[in-house]
Image (tube, rainbow, N blue to C red):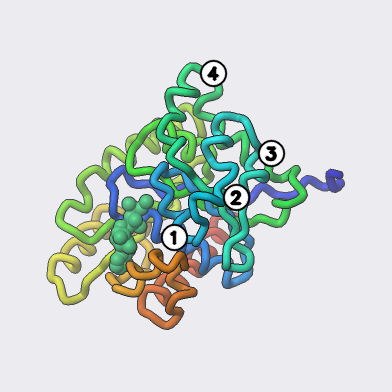
Amino acid sequence: VRSVSTPRRPRVIALANQKGGVGKTTTAINLGTALAAIGEKVLIVDLDPQGNASTGLGVDRRSRKSSTYDVLCGDVGLGQALQPTAVPGLSLAPSTLDLLGVELEIASAKDRAHRLKNAIDELVYDQRCQDLTYVLIDCPPSLSLITINAMTAADAVLVPLQCEFFALEGLSQLLKTVEQVRAGLNPRLIIQGVVLTMFDPRNNLSGQVMADVKSFLGDKVYETVIPRNVRISEAPSYGKPALLYDLRCSGSQAYLRLASEVIKRERALRAAA
Ligand code: ADP
Ligand code: MG
């Protein structure tokens, strides 16, 4: 039964960067966990056929009955694909390798770019999902139709950027894609922010990259920088977010700070709207 006042659509944030290995999945898992830890109700949508977010949250392949592939094909609603995780307040829509073929499958459909948006719009009518406040979408390392679906569904894009020499290379392509989506498919879309990942204070290059990125992107860059931290890279092999694996490590603490920055920006955006 629908309540009298329609529940608010959760804030939808796409974690996107067409480069692989920059920290999209790690940020989805740990930002999601940190947001849940401070009382938000979070859904992570795994849109990468590799399914690293699903594995990293301890949802093994056999238990992925319905997946984001089925959702994009229109066979199940997002609510049906949801699985709980070990983190209270954090659920997951897992992916499977089927997702590799989804683009061909939906290529000729008129609503091919809107499949995820439509599924998320439906969530507010699903009893199981009415209290969701955040949806984080873990994108594949490409600017393909899957990522376009994420950007069409999203309110905002959060870009993880690895502190390495080529960090800014490819960023203009990403920003151009965001522009194109905004011009056509989704006028609401904004850049929520850019988070620097795998920062190594002992490496001069990391500091230089940080300075370059900040002069290029200004206050779009989060104050919180995610340090390179071995605990962060160990956690997924235990099927746990770093925040559950080792809450005290520098990486977990950084993701908690990032979560409060994300919420702060969110409140400011809402107040300005
Ligand atoms: P993407 O999703 O963009 O491909 P991942 O989040 O999978 O990137 O990260 C790539 C690799 O780097 C993974 O092995 C991950 O464990 C590791 N990694 C990510 N962030 C950190 C970090 N802050 N410290 C150490 N290793 C990290
Ligand atoms: Mg990934």
Q: Amino acid at mark 3?
A: Glu
Q: Residue, x 59% and y 72% (percent of image)? A: 38
| Residue 36 x, y percent position in the rendering | 58, 66
Q: Amino acid at mark 1?
A: Gly
* Mark 4, residue position: 110
Mark 3 element type: helix
| Residue 81 x, y percent position in the rendering | 62, 45
Query: Sequence order check: which comes first, mark 4 or mark 1?
Result: 1
Q: Residue, x 28% and y 38% (percent of image)? A: 173
Label 2 or label 3, whichever lies nearer to me, is 3
Where on the image, by quarter, is ligand 1? bottom left
Q: Amino acid at mark 4?
A: Lys
Work out how far the residue at label 2 is from the one at label 4, CA to CA, in angstroms.
Answer: 31 Å
Work out how far the residue at label 4 is from the one at label 3, CA to CA, in angstroms.
Answer: 18 Å
Query: Sequence order check: which comes first, mark 4 or mark 3?
Result: 4
Q: Residue, x 44% and y 75% (percent of image)? A: 245
Q: Which quadrant does the N terminus fall into?
A: top right
Q: Under 8 Å from ligand 1: the CB of mark 2?
A: no
* Mark 1, residue position: 56
* Mark 3, residue position: 122
Instruction: Please give the label number shown on residue 229.
Output: none
- Farthest-out residue, bottom: 248
Q: Does residue 245 appear to the left or right of 38 in the view shown?
A: left
**Is the Cβ of the residue at disc 1 closer than 8 Å to that at disc 2?**
no
